[in-house]
Amino acid sequence: MKMLLLLLLLTGKSHCADSTIVYICDSPGAKKYHLRENCKGLHNCQHRVIKMTLEQAKRKGRTLCALEK
Ligand SMILES: [Zn+2]
């Protein structure tokens, strides 16, 4: 019974929304994350555009790009 509960918790985690892939500009001044790789906000990026999970982006203190709404 305990095993089943543990399994449910683990599988539930993999469906977490924070594992969504987001795009950020790898610049020290950038504060946003982007949901689309071709977002206009990323066109201004003078550095590399890197991919990460939403959770990682939030941990870096990034907030959602205003152009995504
Ligand atoms: Zn954006």
Image: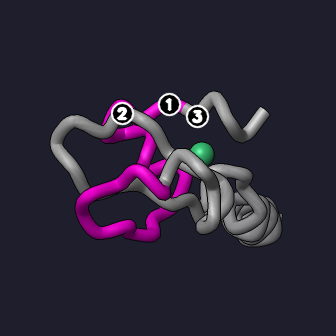
Tell me whether the residue at label 2 lies in contact with that at label 1, contact meaning CB atoms closer than 8 angstroms.
yes
Q: CA distance from mark 3 to mark 2?
A: 9 Å
Name the residue tied to disc 1.
Answer: 63
Q: In terms of secondary structure, where does tag 3 sit?
A: strand
User: Looking at this view, is 20 or 6 the one in front?
Assistant: 20
Where is residue 4 shown, x and y percent of the image? Answer: 81, 69
Is label 2 within 8 A of ligand 1 (CB to nearest ligand atom)?
Answer: no
Q: Is residue 56 visible?
A: yes
Name the residue tied to disc 3.
Answer: 64
Query: Type of residue at label 3?
Result: Leu
Quadrant of residue 6 within the rendered picture: bottom right
Magenta region, residue range: 43-63
Residue, x 38% and y 67% (percent of image)? 49
Is label 3 within 8 A of ligand 1 (CB to nearest ligand atom)?
Answer: yes
Q: Quadrant of the N terminus?
A: bottom right
Name the residue tied to disc 2.
Answer: 31
**56 is within the stretch colored magenta:** yes
Query: Type of residue at label 2?
Result: Lys
Residue, x 22% and y 50% (percent of image)? 27
Tell me whether the residue at label 3 lies in contact with that at label 1, contact meaning CB atoms closer than 8 angstroms.
yes
Give the answer, above or below, for where 6 lies relative to 16. Answer: below
